[in-house]
Amino acid sequence: MGFQAWIKMLGTSVSVKRTSRIVLCALLALLPVTVWLVTEFWRDAKLVEITDDGRNKLELYRSNLQGAIKEHEYLPITLASDKRILDLALYANPANAAAVNIYLEKLAADSGASDIYFMDKSGTTIAASNWNSQASFIGRNFSFRPYFEQARAGQTGHYFAFGITSNVPGYYISHPVRPDGSEFQGAVVVKTHLETLVQRWARGSESILVTDQNGIVIIASHSDWRFRDLGGLPAKDRPRLIASRKYGDYPLDPMPLLAGNWPEDGDLGTLTLGVPSRNLSERADDGNVTPLNARPQTSNGTERAKAEANKSTYLVTSSALPAQGWRMFLLTDKSTLDQSVLSAGLMGGAAHIIFTGLVFIILQRRRAMLEQLEIRDWSQRELERQVRLRTADLMSTNLRLAQEINERSRTENALRTAQSELIQTSKLAALGQMSAGIAHEINQPLTAIRSYAENALKFIARGNSDTANRNLQRISELTDRMGRITNNLKTFSRRPEQDNQPVDVPKQMQTAIDLVLETGRAGVTNIVMNHDDNIKPVIAEANQLIQVFTNLISNAVDACQNIDDAKIEITISEREDRLLVKVKDNGHGILPENLPKLFDPFFTTKPFGDGLGLGLSICYGIIRSFGGTIRAENRPNRGSSFIVELRHDGMDEPAAENSISTATVEAAKTGNKYPAKAEEITDRTGHEIPHT
């Protein structure tokens, strides 16, 4: 690479790198602006949401409070026209008063009202629902209460205050009683407890308070806010209100307002309240509020210092209750808004940083791309130079490659010659194995032919030409069979083109039994065959199937040598789409170590010269060519069993080659006990053997 090319490429890289740094610094400098814009936008949106939500909640709380107040508003109006109250207003005798007391007591219990009482026109209580309690209103004069004055003026009175006798706050509703319809004769008053509503609000998650027309908090979700001055009560009115006991014994301390102002109706305000340093009241088990005047009072400075240490900032929404002259305030902790704004700011900052990172990555990719273009251009020129320099080397290399190609051609020719010799060797090995199979398979028919020929000579000598002719006929059949065996074994090592046809399995099994018995096989004549009725044929080749059955029965006969009660049992049954053939004996069984090798070619447990070990291997190949399976197992008591499964519909695919290798046979590798294998039919007799 030339010096000037390096200088040019470095200049481009430095320029792009400088531009990337400038853009990155500018984006990082704008990060505070992005955070500020996101937080301000989110704050405005959340304030609108909090305002709307506060108005909706205030509407629900106002409906809840109005419902609690109006729950008993009908009672004084109804009682004012009740005959018993009218009679008592006209004739205030003890009998009428006692009857009204019992009536009002029951009515208060049924309606849930705190107290119901009747005052005469002077304001003295004549009948009351609490007539039977220690704090009875009977005989007490409440004419100084505003609700009595409102009733005397002909109106329905509404008033919130502490009870003079009970010292329990409640909402009083009064109505005038006019027996003749014009002259005032008294008033019916119902006192409603609002403490249940207060307790329900206290259990909620919102902070709510209600002030009366004097600006005193009469209902609040926090007990330490109740009966405090919210609106700044004038100093001249404070002694009068305290003396009226409208608020019980509470000193009407101001709310610990540290900053901000209480908003007007519908507006959203922000203010800071300190947590009072002392509780002005405690709640008894019955829900009543008892002032704690016995506790020492602290100075305003000390209380404000403690309130400052425990202050909370709220977002406040207000609503008016015109019917009562009250106002309701909903306080939402400002920390919720601050946390939301902080989260929005963090998310906005994170998004800005991610955007900055993406821009930085794009710039870096652009820089890398420019560098790659410069490097590619230089590489192209350098490559052309290298090509020219290496052309001479390539020419010499080509000459060497031509020589190597000639050498490899000679090596491949030698390899093909070796492969041809290996194939010829394999063919010779297969031919030796085939010769052993031919010797094994022809041995059985030859033995039978010899036996039939000897018997035929004897029968001819006796003049029994019919039996001799039958034996000669069987010799002809066995000769045909030997021809078919030889023809089949010629193609044993390749896929046979056998003529599979529907075969009657019980019939072929009987032929095999006859063949074994008629050759005088080792003295076992107790061969029993059982099969189901209407056995369906299987797709196979009849001659090869007889060959398999003959081998299995011969093996069973050999396994029963020297057994007194020797018995061979053959069962043929159907199982779904297959036919199951079992050849069972009560011989010595099969040794477990011999089971894995049972179907291997040239494996035998007989003495040298008694067998080649190909019978079961050939049987395995034949059954596999029919699409079936064959396996061996030991019986529970004694003996062994060979199970052959054949298909009714033959093989779906072309039959596998009749290979005598059983390396892939897994079914034959189950645990068995003793050897039970026979290879040839060797015994002969000179007498006719009866059929079974």
Image: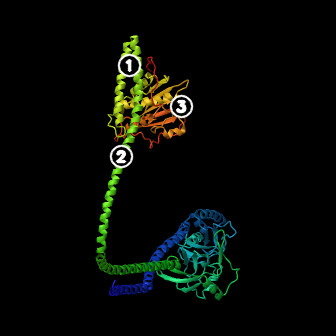
Residue in front for this viewpoint, 35 or 365 = 365
Horizontal relation, residue 89 to residue 471: left or right? right
Spatial CA span between label 1 and label 2:
46 Å
Pointer 1 or 2: first along the chain: 2
Query: Which numbered mark, 1 or 2, is in the foreground of this view?
Result: 2
Q: Which residue is mark 3?
A: 639
Q: Residue tagged by mark 2?
A: 423
**On-image quarter of the C terminus:** top left
Label 2 crowd (10 A; few <14 / some 14-19 / many >=20): few
Q: Residue at x 58, y 77 (%)?
A: 218
10 Å crowding of disc 1: few (<14), some (14-19), many (20+): many
Q: Please tell me which residue is depicted at 39% across the width and 40% down the height of the picture.
A: 659
Whether residue 555 is visible: yes
* Residue type for callout 1: Asn
Tell me which amino acid carries mark 3.
Answer: Gly
Q: Which residue is mark 1?
A: 471
Closer to us: 570 or 126: 570
Q: How far apart are the two marked residues, 2 and 3, measured between alpha carbons?
A: 44 Å
Q: In the rendered structure, which amino acid carries the disc numbered 2?
A: Ile
SS category of the residue bearing label 3: loop
Residue 253 position, x and y percent, is: 62, 83
Residue 569 image point, x, y percent: 49, 27
Q: Is residue 181 visible?
A: no
135, above or below 642, in the image: below
Q: What is the x, y in percent for residue 370? A: 33, 81
Crowd band around label 3 with a 10 angstrom C-alpha radius: few (<14), some (14–19), many (20+): many
